[in-house]
Structures are given as structure tokens and as C-alpha cells.
Amino acid sequence: MNKFYSVSPIGELYVPTECRDAVFARGSVKLFAHQELTNLGRIFTHIQRGGVAIVEGGWEQIIAVMDYIQRHKKELSAPNTDRAKRGKSRHQRNNPKQDREAALSKLMCWANQEGNLQVEPVPVGPYLLELIGEPPDANEDCPFLVPVVTIQRIQNALEGTYAIHALEASLVASENVLAPRSQETIECFQEALQSVYNENLPSNPIVADIGCGSGCLTLLAQQELGEKAKIYASDILPEAVATTKLNIQQVLSNSDNVQVMPPGDLFDPFPSVQFDIIIFNAPWVVARVRNRAELAIHDEKQQTLRRFFEQVADFLKPDGLLILGYADASGPKAIANLEAIIDESGFVCKDLFKRRVATHRSKRKWEHIQVYVLSKK
């Protein structure tokens, strides 16, 4: 499917993956700017007929348009034509709720090639393309589209903050990014970093935080190992990479020794770097991933864990250390499998830091968070 769409008078626009079905459908795409935003009925009718409405102007007025559509959303459905129904399953053709949700996403804003939304005031700051789940260069220096509902979800997520006692700072977590709620997990990693600081590390250790998420452990490593450490952060999700950048900018007055890599799976962002310390808070629930938000938590058959250990030895110096976080949420069998993987991969546990935390599950009231300090045999 094409990734670009020309809209007058804007020109060529990059269409993110989540928008492509709507934009490249048979309905027309129209720009409604500034004074035209007061024509609520006209915008609604355009969307109702299967079109995409791109809006530009005051954010409050755009929210008023969205509120109007929400109030009348029961009137939204897929166009009742053979052409619109063609290629859809019977379930899709008879799912009014799904049709209404799809229609709501057809109200879109646009951002220029630098990622600045063409609304006033701008509701979301930098790294917008990454925050919506796209690689930072996906738009190829073109303006791009963003559904208003997506902007609202990101805005709501970033309004929440999470106080981190170990950092004496508060962090944000965007949509799909694991929020740093577990103080116990962070404390275990802090103790592990403090223990390895006393090892025979070089004065300027090279460190990687794999799966950085909100950037909490990246910041913790910077705090505990000092500004002489060179710290790299990476994550498979562009929105996590963006969140880490936002938190680093918020917390650190000097971030010269911290580098956030482009999004990539595990060690893909590091073709030729070897580290003194690798940090990995692994997904600990042995279950299928159903959405992007579960990538940091769920690991079907522990496949991500296995892939990590298949690669990690190539990126760790011979005397390097691996700091690995895990929890026994999936029971003792998962822990036994983990420890077998550790042994089979040629690692030995030098130290272990644990916390017992309460859960909200009826069948299991407690679980253990474990942070291993591992070295090569």
C-alpha cells in the first residue's frame, strides 16, 4: 500500500500505518482549516459519508469538533453501498460499533516535516512521529497525518507522572510504554548497579539498557555509575524511544554521556558495540502478546528471553556483567526455565536481589521480583 497522499493545499503527506485504511479508502480527503472548523455539521457529514477530515487551527475548536462527532457517533456507520462492503467479512459488515470507532479516527490533524502539529496551542511536544509508533525517519522529510483520537490518547498519557524515589524525580510514560510503577523493581536494579560499581569496572564503562521503556533504568545507570559512563538506551517501540528522550531531557541537566538509539529489536541498533554492562528488564509474563502495550510484559514461550541470550554474548565484553530483571508472575516453571537458559548460555549468577510484592490477583497474593547480576563462566 502507498505511504503518501497528496492533499491540497498542503501537498504530499506521509500516512502512518494506522491511518492508511482510512486515507486510501474510496472516500475523499478534505482539509478544514481555521474558520471552517465552526462548520461542525459539514465536517460530520463528510466523515459520515466515508471521507477523511483533516483539521487545522485552534486545538479547542478541534476538540469541539471531536465532541460533536462523539455526541452523534450513533449516526456513524460504514457507507451502505456494495462498493464499501466489498472485501469485508460478514462480521465486519455487521459491526456498527467497529464502524463508529473507525469513523472517529477519520478526524485527523497534520504535522509539518519537523513534527510540529498545525494546531494552536500544540497539545503534544517533540518526537510526535515516534510517539504515534512510527520510526523517526518514516515520513522521509514530509508532513504527516495523525488522528485526533491518537493525539488525545498520547496527551492524556503524558499528563500522568510517576514519582521514582530512587531518582528523586518524576517520569512520564506515553501510550504503549510500560509505566515505572514498581518502586521495588527499581530498588533491586539500584542495588545491583551499586554492587557492580564496586567491581573491577573501567573508569568509563560502556553500558546498554535494552528495552529502555520510559528510560527509568537508563537514568538510574547514569546516576549510579556517574557521568564518565557511556550509556546507550534502545527499545523496539518508537514510542518508548521517544519517552526515554523526553524523560532524559526533563531529568538530566547534562545528558552528553547518554545516547538513545533508533528503535530496534534487542541488539539490532548495535551492530558493532561491546559493553561492560548490559541491563535488561525482561518481559516476565509467559503469554501471547496481543497489542503493542504488552510487548514489555508478555513473552510467549519465553521466546524473547531466549533470543536475548542467543545474542547477548556477542555484545558483552569477556569480563562484562549482565543485569537481568525478572519476576515469578508466571510461576516457578518460568523461573526454572529462565535459570536453565542462563546456565545453557554460559552465564553464572554472581549476585541476586529480590523483593516480595503484593499482587491484586485472587489466586496469588504475592510475587517475587528478582534482579540477577550475571557474568560469563
Image: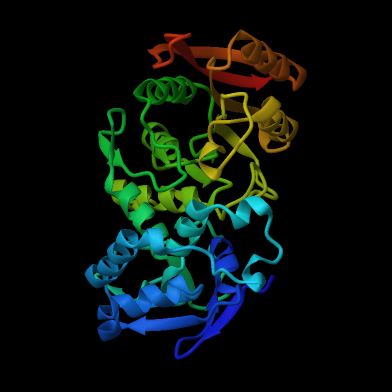
Describe residue 329's horizontal placement relative to residue 3 as left or right: left
Quarter of the picture containing the N terminus is bottom right
Above or below residue 203? Residue 50 is below
The residue closer to the viewer here, 189 or 229, is 189
The residue closer to the viewer here, 358 or 136, is 358
Describe residue 2's horizontal placement relative to residue 359 as left or right: right
Query: Looking at the image, what colour scheme do you see?
Result: rainbow
The residue closer to the viewer here, 37 or 189, is 37
Please tell me which residue is depicted at 38% across the width and 51% down the height of the picture: 255
Please tell me which residue is depicted at 55% across the width and 85% down the height of the picture: 6
The percent position of residue 41, horizontal first and vertical second, equals: 32, 76
The percent position of residue 234, horizontal first and vertical second, equals: 55, 46
Above or below residue 371? Residue 246 is below
Splitting the image into 4 quarters, where does residue 267 fall? top right
Please tell me which residue is depicted at 38% across the width and 64% down the height of the picture: 148
Res. 137 visible in picture: no
Tally of numbered discs: 0
Describe residue 15's horizontal placement relative to residue 58 as left or right: right
Above or below residue 190? Residue 222 is below
Splitting the image into 4 quarters, where does residue 37 fall? bottom left
Quarter of the picture containing the C terminus is top right
The percent position of residue 296, horizontal first and vertical second, equals: 53, 36
The percent position of residue 349, horizontal first and vertical second, equals: 61, 14
Res. 366 visible in picture: yes
Please tell me which residue is depicted at 33% across the width and 51% down the height of the picture: 254
